[in-house]
Image (tube, rainbow, N blue to C red):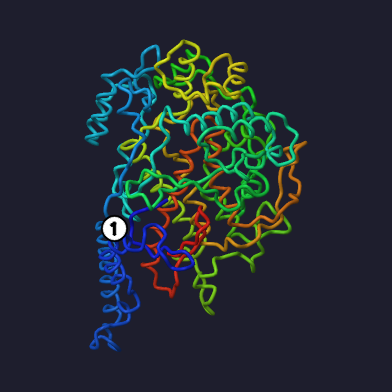
Amino acid sequence: MSQHIPSTLSDSSGAPQNLPRRGFLGQAGAGLAGLAATAAAPALLTALPAAAQGSATAEHAYDEHFRQRASALRTGLAKANAELPIPPHPTNGDEDRYPNRIGSDSRALPHNARGEVDPAAWKLATAAFASREPADFEKIPLGGTRKLLNPVGTLAVSLDGLNAGQFSLPPAPALASAARAGEAIELYWKSLLRDVPLSEYRDGTSHKDVLLAAEEISRAPDFHGPKINGRVTPQTLFRGAALYVDAKDPSGRTGRWVTPPGVVDGPVISQFFYRDVPFGPQSLSARIRGYAPASEFLTAYDEWLHVQNGNAPRGRITQDPTLRYIATGRDLAAYAHAPAAFTVIGNQLLSTPASTADPGYGGLYPGAQIPLAPNNPYLRSKTQGGASGTFGAAYFQSILSLAASLGIRINYYQKWYAQRVLRPEAFGGLVHHRLANGASDYPIHAALLDSQALERSRAKNGSFLLSQVYPEGAPIHSSYPGGAAIIGAVTATLLKAFYDESQPFPNPVQPDPADPTRLIPYQGPPLTLGGELNKLALNYGSGRCWAGIHWRSDAAASYAQGEALVISLLREQKASFREPFEGFSFTRFDGTRAVV
């Protein structure tokens, strides 16, 4: 995503990617000058006072210069970040467009029988959003027992990278827009095809519903998923994309859609999800306990309204007792419900030597072939290696964990204080009232109202509500941008910076279409580490879409936003190092090369 920060980010020609050169230099000049001055670590460490050199006080003099270097660096980085302008935070305008707030997320507040938010409750909520005072949030009346998810937490000052309000993203599609209708058609088809094997999402499939879905989504207006020759194919159906702010538009309102490298190649699911993950003397199985097809929720209006009001759901998930590899959209939704180890699995598989004796306790590559990024300074050292302090696996993991937390701050800042976009489950309520109850004042685009996906969903579920995999529906914050997706984005982007993404992925596999409890070799075009990391990120966001709780654009905007956060973090990390280090580099989700 385009961002307004000083950077050495460049493509192969060396031109900054986030701003035109003139604007980049104009905004970043003072900050870059300060950053360059504070980053001169070797000079600060070697220029000891002459009187101290060779004397008993040399050690103390070094410590004093080390302290000064730390102070100068921290001050310089803070000053450079503070001098950056705040980017625009454009919205889709729905909150002001509809006096009854039908275009805004209001779940967990009290609603009337039609599902429209209580005006007094909404007034108190928006007063808290405006003041951002913790005490004002305590005045918001809730409709049930579920609480608002961490609105004040996102106001914490971030001590690493840029602050939450310094990141931009384009506005979400508006409620009545063709773009929203296209995404809704996709979600209704996903809800219908959750139990179709993912092996059917390939060119040459004979699965009738997959072919019908691809055909209808191809015709959907203003749809931005991956296409081949302008059409959605079974191979590209439901695969992810990324959404950047177009740097050519200073208003920040124009989005730029891209298909990340590798995400339409090979199986739908990243190879990282099909490997047992080593944890020293333990191993985390790649097989999951999935959800049974009976796990469909919020299609009865009374239960839907009960959950919209913030009450605990009455439905319960039925678990599939047989452990299996991720083989369907429902499986991916089940994984994405609470993936506690997501930020760990990639680093563990890449940093742990492979084990021929017991593959479940080893990583992807032999010990002598761990694919560290070519610019890792310890690849050139004759006497030293990286460790927990810098450039080792434990150091990498510390940055992965930090970035996930900071990513949520950035993401929730937009959810609570800028966007407040309607969740798909609430949108389904508007569709239901429009068609079942004649609510002609609910402005749903005709492309969805006339779609096969919607009619098939009604025939299956008995209502026009969008079925959900999770009985509670979505978390209690707005839809745009996607929280899971930004965690996926920072994870994949950091791993591309820490490891050699150009390496081929060894021994790729996929679930046996006849038996998802076992894996079989994948045969097809070669897969790369970078492409499978991109899939890793996009699979996490897509899993939440399969569940029915997110729009495509929610996830797509978060991928670019998370990438921008990583760039700001890596810039600061690079400035802090003592090792001779040329910088981090990786391929962005739009296919261009970043150098930090």
- Please name whichever residue, 222 or 190, is drawn nearer the observer in this view of the structure: 222
Q: Is residue 433 left or right of residue 322?
A: left
- Please name whichever residue, 411 or 273, is drawn nearer the observer in this view of the structure: 411
Q: Is residue 354 left or right of residue 134?
A: right
Q: Is residue 98 left or right of residue 403?
A: left
Determine if residue 150 is in view: no
What residue is drawn where x is 47% and y is 51%?
490
Query: Which three-letter amino acid code belongs to the residue tagged 1?
Result: Asn
* Quadrant in the picture for residue 482: top left
What residue is drawn where x is 54% and y is 15%?
463
Q: Secondary structure at mark 1?
A: helix
* Quadrant in the picture for residue 124: top left
Residue 441 image offset from top left, x and y in percent: 39, 16
Indicate the quadrant containing the C terminus: top left, top right, bottom left or bottom right: bottom left
What residue is drawn where x is 26% and y is 82%?
57
Against 129, residue 304 (above or below) is: above
Against 66, residue 370 (above or below) is: above
Against 207, residue 309 (above or below) is: above
Residue 481 image offset from top left, x and y in percent: 42, 39
- Please name whichever residue, 309 or 381, is drawn nearer the observer in this view of the structure: 309
Say which residue label 1 marks.
Answer: 81
Residue 199 image offset from top left, x and y in percent: 71, 39
What residue is drawn where x is 25% and y is 24%?
123
